[in-house]
Structures are given as structure tokens and as C-alpha cells.
Image (cartoon, rainbow, N blue to C red):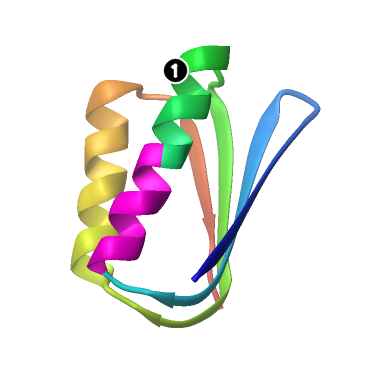
Amino acid sequence: MKTNLTYSDDVLYVNVEGNLNKKGVSSLQKKMYSVISEYGIQDIVIDIKGTSKIDKTAFYDMLDDYDSRYGGNLKIMEK
């Protein structure tokens, strides 16, 4: 799994490629939360179009957790 985080125009863009399994989701969550907490980012776009496999249960659990912790504006770009 490869992730790329980019901050531009007050939006955090998260690009994910490869196999996003449960461990990958956990790693992605740690990276995102670290940046979000440090910089107070409210707008996030997660692009998962480049993923080959995705653990949807783990991924959507992470989104629910994000919503309950931060409640920001989150957009998912899917295939």
C-alpha cells in the first residue's frame, strides 16, 4: 500500500494505492489523525480509486471513528 498526503487550499488530500487491508487502514488512520490533530484540518478528500483491494469494514469503521472524533468535511473518491 502506498499513501500520499498533500495539503493545498485548506484541504488535506489523501491518495491511496494498492491493497488497503486492515493493517493498511490502521496505518492510514494514524497518519491522517497525526496531521489533522497537528494542523486542525477540517476538509479532507480521500482518493481510493487506485486501490486494488480494500477491507471495506475496516475502512468504513475508520470513517465512522473520524466522524465521531473530528466531525470535519470528508469526501471519498471511489471507482
| Magenta-drawn stretch contains 24 | yes
The part of the chain drawn in magenta is 22-30
- Magenta segment, principal secondary structure? helix
Instruction: Sort mark 1 into few (<14), some (14-19) or many (20+) by Cα contacts within 10 Å.
Output: few
Q: Residue at x 59, y 46 (%)?
A: 45
Q: Is residue 12 left or right of residue 36?
A: right
- From the image, which quarter does the C terminus lie in? bottom right
Could you say whether the residue bearing mark 1 is in a helix, strand or loop? helix
Q: Position of residue 7 (x, y in %)?
A: 72, 33
Q: Is residue 55 left or right of residue 36?
A: left
Q: Residue furthest bottom?
A: 52
User: Considering only vertical position in the picture, is 28 above or below 44?
Assistant: below
| Residue 38 shows in this picture | yes
| Residue 40 shows in this picture | no
Q: Is residue 51 left or right of residue 14?
A: left
Judging by the rendered image, the residue that carries numbered circle 1 is 37
Q: What is the tally of numbered marks visible in this picture?
A: 1
| Magenta-drawn stretch contains 26 | yes
Q: Position of residue 46 (x, y in %)?
A: 55, 52
Residue type highlighted by circle 1 = Ser
Q: Residue at x 24, y 66 (%)?
A: 22
User: Considering only vertical position in the picture, is 32 above or below 43?
Assistant: below
Q: Residue furthest right?
A: 9
Q: Residue at x 27, y 63 (%)?
A: 23
Q: Position of residue 40 (x, y in %)?
A: 53, 13
User: Considering only vertical position in the picture, is 18 above or below 41?
Assistant: below
Q: Residue at x 56, y 20 (%)?
A: 41
Q: Quadrant of residue 69?
A: top left
Q: Quadrant of residue 53?
A: bottom left
